[in-house]
Amino acid sequence: MVEVALTPEGAALHRHMVTVPPAIGDAVGLTPDEIATTQDLVRRLTANILRHITRNEDGSI
């Protein structure tokens, strides 16, 4: 068995990092549901664009 643990510096960074997602949420002014919807739409747009580019072998859009 291998045990893995954070260094004191890693633990301090972890304590700081857990505050980042809520701060981003506050900054964008969206509800968690709106953020999830936005992420889904961006993923869908990305997939559509990549699929379109793949269809056009010369890379044209």
Image (cartoon, rainbow, N blue to C red):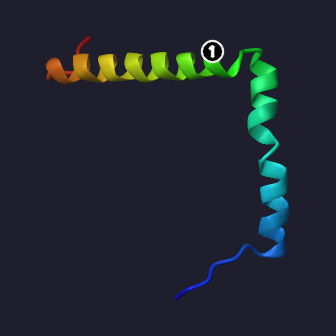
Q: Is residue 24 above or below residue 7?
A: above
Residue 17 shown left or right of residue 32 in the figure: right
Q: Nearer the viewer, residue 60 or 17?
A: 17
Q: Is residue 36 above or below residue 18?
A: above
Residue found at x 72% / y 15%: 30
Specify the amino acid type for callout 1: Glu
Percent x, y of residue 47: 33, 23
Residue 2, quarter of the rendered image: bottom right
Residue 7, quarter of the rendered image: bottom right
Percent x, y of residue 36: 57, 22
Q: Residue furthest toward the top?
A: 61
Q: Is residue 11 above or below residue 35?
A: below
Residue 32 shown left or right of residue 10 in the figure: left
Percent x, y of residue 33: 62, 18
Residue found at x 43% / y 24%: 43
Q: Callout 1 environment at 10 Å: few (<14), some (14 to 19), or many (20+)?
A: few
Disc 1 designates what residue? 34
Query: Judging from the image, what secondary structure is the residue with disc 1 in?
Result: helix
Percent x, y of residue 17: 78, 49
Q: Quadrant of the C terminus?
A: top left
Q: Nearer the viewer, residue 12 or 1?
A: 1
Q: In this figure, what is the number of numbered marks?
A: 1
Residue found at x 47% / y 16%: 41
